[in-house]
Image (tube, grey):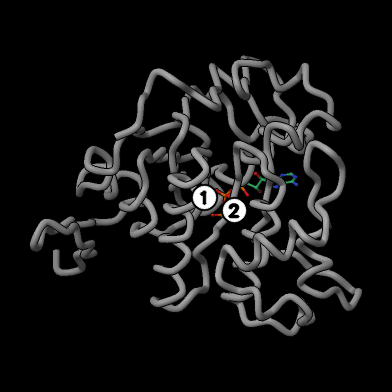
């Protein structure tokens, strides 16, 4: 269980967006340390929330805090001390190696060093791909490289956009176990977005958002149920308990 009195990120009545707000009024808190999953339909604002924390999306009104400080008061140069962000995908026209990609991460002292990058790839069990070209990796290897890039920053908060998308079952569970291990070994917080109910079930905290509003927030046991998921996705979802595990079934027979 996480201590819910200690929040790493808080939004209070925040309006967030780009040229104009796409999230109209959101209030939520993310406990530390935790593995937190933000669930929600396509276009509900999950990525935009992560982007607000790194000041890529704009907070138009209300409050947004990281570590108790207003995000608006932090400079871009301060951010690596607090947070590292991993996008869902990266594209490059250049022939970057895995090492180049991981070393393109910032930490509080500057760029991540070669030794730190290699150590992180080894910690994640992919030390063998250090010299490979990033654009020639499999999807799972790319995901682990992006996680290594975020992790090597040593930031106390990692934002991972869709860390388990497009992974086979084995790699998906490997990534979930790695994220759990990172949170318990390093006492950091990982906020992941996506559509992966298994990742949510393995999390300490789940935030369900729809149309830029929090629909439900809490421990997975309180959020991953038929009522919340049916309302969240607008379909008839049944959550079954089998041997203590929750399984998701979408009903199409009524
Ligand atoms: N750079 C941008 N400029 C303007 N609007 C944007 C930008 N990025 C996203 N949006 C809009 O913000 C809204 C929320 O998008 P966002 O990417 O945050 O959703 P999401 O929940 O992450 O979706 P998905 O699950 O499909 O990745 C959408 O209406 C989208 O069109």
Side of 225 where 124 appears, left or right = right
Establish if 124 lies above or below 12: below
Assign a secondary structure to mark 2: loop
In the rendered view, does 98 fall on the left or right side of 216?
A: right
Give the residue at the far bottom of this rendering. Answer: 136
Give the answer, above or below, for where 130 lies relative to 188.
Answer: below
Q: Earlier in the sequence, mark 2 or mark 1?
A: 2
* Left or right for 7, reference 252: right
Can residue 208 be seen at all in this image of the molecule?
A: yes
The 10 Å Cα crowd at callout 2, few under 14, some 14 to 19, many 20 or more, is many
Identify the residue position indicated by label 1 in the image. 193
Q: Quadrant of the C terminus?
A: bottom left
Disc on res. 141 = none
Q: Residue at x 45, y 21 (%)?
A: 6
Percent from the top left, x then y, of residue 105?
79, 52
Q: Residue at x 54, y 27 (%)?
A: 8
| Residue found at the far right of this picture | 94
Q: Position of residue 249 (x, y in %)?
A: 21, 65
User: How dense is the environment of label 1, judged by Cα within 10 Å: few (below 14), some, or many (20 and up)?
Assistant: many
Q: Residue at x 39, y 18 (%)?
A: 5
Mark 1 Cβ and ligand 1 under 8 Å apart: yes
Classify residue 239 by image quadrant.
bottom left
Q: Is residue 207 left or right of residue 152?
A: left
**Mark 2 residue's CB less than 8 Å from ligand 1:** yes
Residue underneath mark 2: 161
Q: Are marks 2 and 1 in contact (CB under 8 Å)?
A: yes
Q: Camera-side residue: 166 or 109?
A: 109
Q: CA distance from mark 2 to mark 1?
A: 5 Å
Task: Name the residue located 71 percent from the left edge and 22 percent from the top edge.
Answer: 71
Quarter holding residue 3:
top left
Q: Quadrant of residue 2?
A: top left
Q: Horizontal and vertical percent for residue 1?
A: 29, 35
């Amino acid at each position: 269980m996480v201590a819910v009195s200690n929040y790493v990120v808080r939004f209070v009545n925040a309006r967030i967006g780009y040229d104009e707000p796409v999230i109209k009024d959101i209030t939520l808190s993310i406990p530390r340390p935790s593995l937190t999953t933000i669930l929600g339909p396509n276009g509900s604002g999950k990525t935009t929330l992560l982007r607000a924390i790194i000041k890529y999306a704009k907070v138009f009104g209300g409050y947004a805090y990281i570590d108790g400080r207003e995000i608006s008061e932090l400079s871009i140069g301060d951010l690596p001390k607090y947070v590292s962000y991993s996008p869902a995908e990266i594209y490059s026209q250049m022939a970057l190696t895995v090492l180049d990609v991981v070393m393109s991460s910032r930490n509080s002292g500057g760029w991540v060093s070669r030794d730190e990058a290699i150590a992180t790839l080894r910690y994640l069990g992919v030390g063998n791909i250090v010299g490979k070209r990033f654009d020639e990796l499999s999807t799972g290897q790319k995901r682990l490289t992006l996680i290594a890039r975020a992790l090597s920053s040593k930031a106390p908060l990692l934002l991972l956009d869709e860390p388990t998308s497009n992974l086979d079952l084995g790699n998906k569970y490997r990534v979930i176990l790695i994220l759990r291990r990172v949170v318990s070994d390093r006492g950091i917080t990982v906020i992941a977005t996506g559509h992966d109910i298994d990742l949510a079930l393995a999390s300490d905290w789940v935030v369900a958002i729809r149309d830029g509003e929090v629909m439900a927030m809490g421990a997975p046991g309180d959020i991953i149920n038929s009522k919340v998921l049916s309302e969240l996705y607008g379909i008839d979802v049944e959550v079954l308990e089998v041997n203590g595990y929750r399984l998701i079934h979408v009903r199409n027979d009524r």
